[in-house]
Amino acid sequence: KQDFLRVEDLKVHFRLNRRLFAEQRLVHAVDGVSFSIRRGTTFGLVGESGSGKSTTAFAIMRLVKLTGGRIDLDGIDLGGLEGKALREMRRRFQIIFQDPYSSLNPRMRAGAIVREPMDLMAIGNPEERDGKVAEIFRRVGLRPEQQALFPHQFSGGQRQRIGVARALSTEPDLIVCDEPVSALDVAIQAQILNLLRNLQRELGLTYLFISHDLGVVQYVCDEVAVMYLGRIVEQGDRISLFGKPLHPYTWALLSAVPSTDPALHSKGRRIRLVGDPPSPIDPPAGCRFVARCPFAVERCHAESPRLRTIHPGHSVACHLVDDDGNAPHHRLD
Ligand code: SF4
Ligand code: MG
């Protein structure tokens, strides 16, 4: 399958101008990120809060300004689009938010919520929009009569179905799923994830799936990138990345997932992550994980590791992973 979305050396830096600081500080929210997503697949961006995963998604949706880099969607340079061309393009990507309780307007009926993006973008005539809304309600497992209800009259899972329906209304190709099940009960999570997978198959959708939960990512993603402080530290297809995680940070994240296959842990002891991630304001000069990495050596403080390919489709940024794919945590036992 061809690359549908291609992100090259993406940078998003913010200036912080608070009185708190004597001088201006630069936040390196996203700091040189590259990846591509094949059409009809799901690409996972994983990391703790502050890793830059949401900012990466917002940059792709042109909701924040790029400091540098390039984003191509289906061969079109998104950064170069303005005015009408940008509005036309916006139809093609939508977002599903984390919290179905706060992201839906409580004073709007469900039907109007789903219809709104079509109204804003003047898609079709009013009767066509009515028909489309009813069709989307069925598609996401809601009854068309439920259009008349307000968000508080639905359960959490049903509310997220409304969020999904709203995202589908403009017939997008790319949907950013920003922690779409994190606010839901575990029992409901699987229903929404299965809905997303079925919709992908039926409609040929491409997903950029943002999550801190590796269990969820392992369930839905074809390809995964792990982010830390604005950079990708490991990237691979699902089988390689979960089968043989190479970066100590990925290993630490996996160690924290109780449901992960116990065989994964047989090759090494768990790494417990201590402390919060350091701030993306003035990040450390060497490896950004250095302050929390149990394997750090002198070189890690001085030199920033490059993302390099170890096996086809699997890359890592760590000085201590050798070219045969031996990682420091593999030697723990
Ligand atoms: Fe740890 Fe050094 Fe590898 Fe960074 S480069 S993850 S500090 S071993
Ligand atoms: Mg976020």
Image (cartoon, helix red, strand yellow):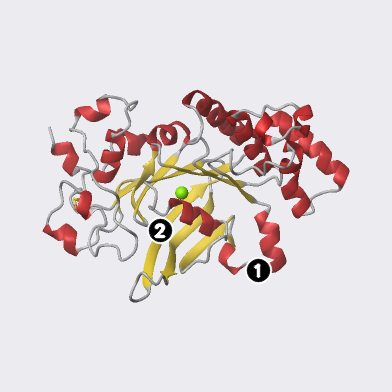
Q: Is residue 321 above or below residue 202?
A: below
Horizontal side of 282 relative to 32 (left or right) equals left
Amino acid type at image mark 1? Glu
Q: Using the rendered image of the protein, determine whether residue 157 is visible from the camera's viewpoint.
A: yes
Q: Who's the residue at 57% across and 60% down the image? A: 63
Amino acid type at image mark 2? Val
Image mark for residue 206: none
Is the residue under label 2 in contact with that under label 1 (CB below 8 Å)?
no
Separation of residues labelled 1 and 2 (CA atoms): 23 Å
Q: Report whether the residue tagged 1 is closer than 8 Å to ligand 2.
A: no
Horizontal side of 114 relative to 14 (left or right) equals right
Whole-percent x, y for residue 116 in the image: 74, 47
Whole-percent x, y for residue 51 in the image: 38, 52
Q: Is residue 97 above or below residue 74?
A: above
Q: Who's the residue at 12% across and 59% down the image? A: 298
Horizontal side of 48 relative to 106 (left or right) equals left
Q: Report whether the residue tagged 2 is closer than 8 Å to ligand 2.
A: no
Name the image quarter holding the C terminus: top left
Name of the residue lying farthest toward the front: 19
Q: Using the rendered image of the protein, determine whether residue 247 is visible from the camera's viewpoint.
A: no
Local crowd size for mark 1, using a 10 Å CA cut-off: few (<14), some (14–19), many (≥20): few
Pointer 1 residue: 82
Q: Earlier in the sequence, mark 1 or mark 2?
A: 2
Considering the numbered disc 2 on the image, is that residue within a helix, a strand or a loop? strand
Pointer 2 residue: 33
